[in-house]
Amino acid sequence: MTPQGCGLGLREPFVDTIDRYVDRIDFLEIVPENMMHMNRKEAKRFEKICDHFPMIAHGLSLSLGDTEHLDRDHLKKLKKFLDRYGIETYSEHLSFTSLDGVQSYELLPLPMTEGMVEAVTAKIARIEEILERPLVIENPTYYTVLESTMEESRFIGEILKRSGAKLLLDINNVYVNAFNHGFEAKAFIDALDLDRVAYCHIAGHLECRNDLFIDTHGMPVKEAVWDLMAYVMAKKRLPVMLERDNNIPPLKKLMKEFDRMKEIYDAA
Amino acid sequence: MQPERALLTDFFAAVRGAGGKGDRYDNAEIYRKLIFYRFDETLSAVYPLFKKELGKKRWKRWVKAYIAHRPEMPFMWQMPEGFGRFARKRMKKRAAKGRNYLCELLWFEWNEVASMMAPSPIKSKKKVDFSAAYRSGSSVRMRYLRHPVMHGKRGPKSLYPTLLHQSGDGGVVWRILTPFIYKLIQACDGKRPLEEIVRSLCHSEGIDEKNARQILKKELRPFLKEVVLTPVN
C-alpha cells in the first residue's frame, strides 16, 4: 500500500486512544525497531490498530551509509514483521547510524560523492532483495558536511535514479538544512523530481543557536515549515504525515497540528 | 569507495569520542551531545539506581566511555545489556568498592527490562500435573542475590533466591523464593517429569516426598498461572 492523504506517526503514549481518530487519519507510520519485540498483549493491540488504519513503516537502523556491512539477520526479521502485518511501504534514512556493527543510534551524515552514490545504490538493491519490497529513502538533516563533490539535491536525485527507490521528503529537514548550510529551501525542492516522492514528513525542530537548528521532533511545527509544506503541495499534492518523537503532547493537542497539516493538504 | 570509507570511519570515531576531539569536523560536538543524550536517556531509564550509586559525574564519564567503546547491540532497547557487561568489566578492572552490590544491581535493573521484553506467556495451566515435564517461561530470570537490590539496598547481606517474571498484565514482578522452589524451577528443563525432579530434590534435601507433593500442589499454582512454569507437551 502506498500512503494516501494525511498520516500520523503512531507512538506509545497514544496507542490506546488512536482509534478515536479513525475518520480523520488516513494512515499511520510506525518505527519497526520499537515494535519487533512486542509481547503477545502488545501485538494483539497492534493487530487491532492495523485493522482500522493503513500502516507504513519507517526504519532507523539499516545504516544505509555503512555499505560494507549488511545485517541479514535483522533484515530477515524485519521482513517477517512487515509481512505479518501486511506493511508494504518501508523507508530508511539516507545516512549512517552504525559502522561495522558498532552503534551510535544517531543519524550521521554521508559524504556526497559519486563513490557514495554507487555504494548506497548497491546496498539498496541488496536490502530490497531481502525485504522483497521497494525501499523509500529519506533526506536526513546534517550538521556537518563531510567532503562532498556534489550538492545534496543531486546526491539524492542520483541515488533515486540509479536505485529506482522513491523519496520520503522530510520537509522540516529541508528547512533545517537550508538554514544551517545557507541554501534556498524552495530551490532545493525545485531541484527534486517530485514524481519520485512517495510521501512527506512534517515535524518540529529546535532553534539551538542563531546559526544552528536541530531536528528534534520534539517541538510543534514552525510557521516557516508549514509555509514550505504549502509550497511543496502547490507543486504536487503529496501524501504527508506528522512526525513527533519527543515531548509528545496529548493526542487531542497533537491532532490540532494534524488538522493544520490536513488543511494545507486539502487546500492544495 | 576507499576514501569515503576512511572518512566515515574517522568521523564515526570522532563523534563517538573514540578518536581525538573531533575538532576537524564542524559541529562534531553537537553530534557528540546528540549521541550522548540518546545513550543517557535509555540507560538512565533502565539503570536509575545504578546511576544514583555512581553519581552524576561518574555516570557521565562511564556513559561516554561506553559510547567510545564498542556498543554493538542492534536495537536501542538492548543497548543497556551491553552497558551492563561493560560496567561490570570496568568495575572488575578497577577493583571498584562495593562491586558485588553494584553488579547485582546491574543484573536486577537490566533483567526487569529483559523480562518485560520477552515474548509473553503463551498458555497457562492451573493444576499441577506431576507426570508432566515443565520448563520455565521465556520471561523468567533467576539469580541468587547476596544484597537486597530489589529494595535498592545494600543490606542486610543474605541469600535472596530471586525470581523476575512477566505478570499477566504485561508488567514485571519479582519474588523471593524458598530455596526449594528456586531449585525446583531451575531444574525444570522440559525433559524430566515434575515428579522425578521433586523426588530427587526431596532426597537431596531430606524432605518427605509425600508431604512436599501435597504442599506443591497449592504452592506451584501461581507459578503455573503466570507461566513461570509451562508444561511441555
Image: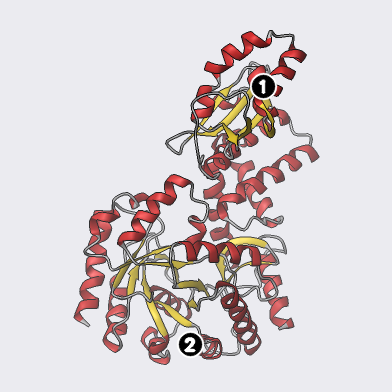
* Residue occupied by mark 1: B195
- Quadrant location, the C terminus of chain A: bottom left
* Residue occupied by mark 2: A153
In the displayed structure image, the side of residue A172 where residue A99 appears, left or right: right
Residue A209 placed where, x, y %? Answer: 44, 66
B187 or A194: which is nearer to us?
B187
| Residue A171 showing in the rendered view | no
Residue B161 placed where, x, y %? Answer: 65, 22
Q: Quadrant for residue B178, please give it.
A: top right
- Asked if residue A54 is positioned above or below residue A94 in the image, the reply reads above
| Residue A37 showing in the rendered view | yes
Mark whose residue sits in front, 1 or 2 = 1
* Secondary structure type for disc 2: helix
Q: Amino acid at mark 2?
A: Ser
Q: Amino acid at mark 1?
A: Glu
Residue plotted at (54% across, 63% down): A80
Residue A267 placed where, x, y %? Answer: 19, 80
A130 or A160: which is nearer to us?
A130
Label 2, residues with CA under 10 Å away: few <14, some 14-19, many ≥20: some
